[in-house]
Amino acid sequence: MKGKNIVIIGGNSGIGKAVAALAKEGGANLLLYSRTGEGNYQIDITEDSSELQDLPEVIDGLVYCPGSINLKPFHRISMEDFKIEMDVNFFGAVKTLQACMKGLKKSEAASVVLYSTVAVQTGMGFHAGIASAKGAVEGLVRSLAAEWAPNQIRVNAIAPSLTDTPLAKQLVSTDEKRAASDKRHPLGRIGTPEDIAEATLFLLDDKSSWVTGQILHIDGGMSSLK
């Protein structure tokens, strides 16, 4: 990672913060963009007027972290709810990719990492909003991986299960809720930001130079084991 220019959207908390810490430890040059402004720059990627300021001429890695967890029964999900899910998870990623495309193409070996969810592959009740938005992300990953392969830009996504981040706070807010969530996973626990960050660093690093168009299920076995 040493000397690589890595752009992280949402690098101020949760998974993004863990990714930033590992990348910095590896010697990467970081540009952090977040809604709160912690890091380098403040940005609300859902706003049409948002721009990524001071992007480097060459971008070796791009990580888009913003996400949402709004679990509701389908009959209670409004069109506005669906729009919000798409704005945060999908359209925000599209805007970021378009803004960074020139810089990525100038790198000799660029890597893009987006995030999906275990709920895309594994049908889960009350996940219609987020699973729909993240399903769009997975389609985008595979399409761009094919389109950008001649430019040596790799595009992959990680599909976590429940991870202990501020976004998931309400789902593990009591000992009982956490114990129930741990029990649902074959490995007996929910994920940590570091679990997902380590996989992200692998995808950013040259060690994964033959990996593109993939959705890595880092989910404690949730998607494939019973």
Image (tube, rainbow, N blue to C red):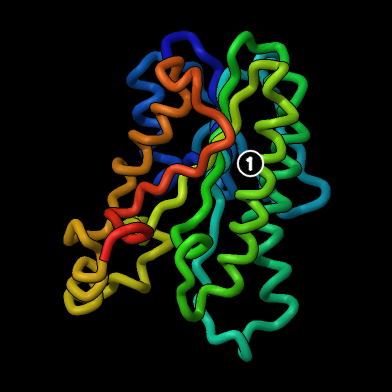
Q: Image point 64% across, 40% down: which residue?
A: 142
173 sits left or right of 125 in the view: left
Q: Quadrant of residue 114?
A: top right
Tell me the quadrant of the picture where the N terminus can be found.
Answer: top left
Residue 61: % across, % down: 56, 24
Residue 177: % across, % down: 24, 76
The residue that disc 1 covers is 141
Q: Quadrant of residue 81?
A: bottom right
Q: Image point 71% across, 12% down: which residue?
A: 106
Q: Is residue 79 above or below residue 192?
A: below
Q: Is residue 119 above or below residue 34?
A: below
Q: Is residue 64 above or below residue 30?
A: below
221 sits left or right of 110 in the view: left
Q: Give the residue type that dot 1 points to.
A: Val
Which residue is outermost to the right? 49
117 sits left or right of 137 in the view: left
Q: Image point 44% across, 43% down: which residue?
A: 216
Which residue is outermost to the bottom? 75
Residue 218: % across, % down: 36, 47
70 sits left or right of 43 in the view: left
Q: Image point 37% across, 73% down: which residue?
A: 170
Q: Quadrant of residue 224?
A: bottom left
Identify which residue, 220 or 94, lies in the foreground: 220
Identify which residue, 198 or 17, lies in the foreground: 198
- Which SS class for mark 1? helix
How many marks are shown on the rendered structure? 1
Tell me the quadrant of the picture where the C terminus can be found.
Answer: bottom left
